[in-house]
Image (spheres, rainbow, N blue to C red):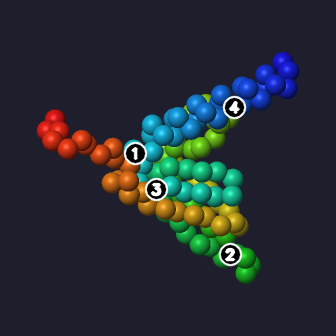
Amino acid sequence: MSAEDLEDYETEMELALYREYRDVVGLFSYVVETERRFYLANSVDLRPRTTDGEVWFELVLSDAWVWDVYRSARFVKTVRVVTFKDVNVEELSKSDLEVPKPEGFTG
């Protein structure tokens, strides 16, 4: 396999992952970003912790989808993340995800 073949394969995998994300994003309530991963989830429990003066975060996600091109199963029931880095949690606005209906449409 040439370097070009490998690059084409990786590009195809990333495009398939993006398409999957686009198809499932409307099923979730939160977007969560950590240093290592990007998640969609319906439940987020973020707890700051302190040990020996160091602050870290414990994050538990339920009903989640993981953005990871190398995972065969991206839907997971529960995810537990422990990190010393920043965590970003955003609640998705369902109205932003819905396709507007054409005027006069009654169906």
Q: In what quadrant of the picture does the C terminus appear?
A: top left
- For marks 4 and 3, give the CA distance: 27 Å
- Residue that carries the numbered disc 4 in the rendered image: 11
Q: CA distance from mark 4 to mark 1?
A: 24 Å
Q: Which mark is residue 26?
A: 1
Q: Are marks 4 and 2 in contact (CB under 8 Å)?
A: no
User: What distance separates the C-alpha of mark 2 from that of mark 1?
Assistant: 33 Å
Q: Is residue 40 above or below residue 59?
A: above
Which of the two labelled residues, at mark 4 and mark 1, occupies the earlier sequence position? 4
| Res 81 quadrant in image | bottom right
Report x, y in % for residue 90: 49, 62
First reached walking from the N terminus: tag 2 or tag 1? 1
Quadrant housing residue 50: bottom right
Q: How many residues crowd around disc 3 within 10 Å: few (fewer than 14), some, or many (20 or more)?
A: many
Residue 40: tell me if it is visible: yes
Query: Which residue position is annotated with label 2?
Result: 55
Q: Is residue 8 left or right of residue 57?
A: right
At label 1, counting other C-alpha atoms closer than 10 Å, the crowd grade (few under 14, some 14-19, many 20 or more) is: some
Q: Residue at x 69, y 31 (%)?
A: 11
